[in-house]
Amino acid sequence: MAAPRPSAAALTPSLTEVGQPREAGEQGGDWPAESRLLALLTGLWSAMGLLVLSSASWWTAGQELGDPWYYIKRQLIWLAIGWLVLLLAVRLPLRLWFRLAPMIVLLGLGLLVVTLLAGTTVNGAQRWIAMGPVRLQPSELIKPFLVLQAASLFSSWNRRSNDQRLGWLLVFGGLVWLVLKQPNLSTASLMGMLLWLIALGSGLAWYWLLLAAALGSAVFSFSLWLNPYQLVRVLSFLDPFATAEGNGYQLVQSLLAIGSGGWTGSGFTLSMQKLQYLPFQTTDFVFAVYAEEFGFIGGVLLLLFLLLYAFLGLRVSLATRSHKAALLAIGATTLLIGQSILNIGVATGTIPTTGLPLPLVSYGGNSLVACLFSAGLLIRVDLEREVSASGRLPPLRKRRHRCAAGARTR
């Protein structure tokens, strides 16, 4: 006699099961699709960045330092540290990171003061603290924790006292001012953009947003007035070829590199502009090397990659039920994708020349660790939908359909 077929009710999950966190180890209790795809894309981004940096750096490193692999060997060490930090961000609950954020932001404020008093100056900017062979850049490392604390503040803005609001706004303003003093106009502008977008996402009243925008514009203008070289740099991007031997030199060489790539590029490692022509080809203008070697098609593919990453970050933000976690996802996505767009905008002459690195591509351990930590926080936001009450993470495996289990019960 044939075994009875399972009923439709047995194959259909109840309403209480839909959208509810499942215990780790249960069928279907695996990583959400967005988490797996974000982890995969972050890995691809890291690998691509390492390849692009190897091409951009080998000639300069060999000529100036006697070791073509100088930058890559150090970037590999920081990449390993960054992925350990990413895994730590994924494994620990968000409530712990939110609890640590205020202390680390205040610590970062103190480190920025130390940087101004006893920091190391490179290319006219005092942004680093030397600790033996390692140089820390507090303005880079503090970015993810600035996002965490801003998400915490603005998600509970209406429940905060006026003293708490004013206190943290003064702290945020102090951070931006200290970064401006280094001077580092680009990072200060990025910090302001992060704070403003998180406040916008929180639903803050429009008059607060307009006031913040006006204040930010005033600070930006005041910085240009205090530092005439910044104003010259901002204006030079309007017609860089007019000052091709002076302030427009960097942008002119970048545009020549991008234009030389044509549709398909010159080929991997075959950039000519990186050979003593293009300045800062391992940091601020690494995209110009990429565009020369992979061409217009490669540039479009990179932009589509960033668009996909931003789309996933937006999906994570919309899917979470926690307002605080949603704002964290917005901030982490903005930090990674917004900074990428700003870097590409500088290299293509779309916006004034600034000193922002291209996330996960430009040489520099501080930026690499901060960006990978931000990616880990974004993945963790999505995973919190699947974390059990005990705090255990669901295993990373392919989803199995519940109906398969029902079909086996005969």
Image (tube, rainbow, N blue to C red):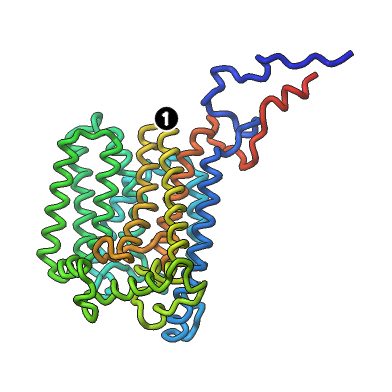
Q: Amino acid at mark 1?
A: Arg
Query: In the visual, does 251 lie left or right of 299?
Result: left
**Residue at image location 12% in from the left, 53% down from the top:** 218
| Residue 34 coordinates in the image, percent (x, y) | 51, 41
Neighbour class for label 1 at 10 Å: few (<14), some, many (≥20)? few
User: In this rendering, does residue 178 appear at all?
Assistant: yes
Q: Is residue 386 above or below residue 360?
A: above
Judge from the rendering whether residue 254 lies leftward or rightward of residue 13; answer left or right: left
Query: Where, by quadrant of the figure, is residue 299 drawn?
Result: bottom left
- Up-down relation of residue 228 to residue 392 (above or below): below
Q: Nearer the viewer, residue 113 or 408?
A: 408
The vertical placement of 208 against 88, above or below, is above
Q: Which residue is mark 1?
A: 321
* Outermost residue, right side: 1
**Measuring 83% from the left and 16% from the top, which residue is drawn there?**
3
Q: Nearer the viewer, residue 255 or 118?
A: 255
Compared to 292, does 373 lie above or below? above
Give how far across and how far down residue 191 sits, in percent. Answer: 27, 53
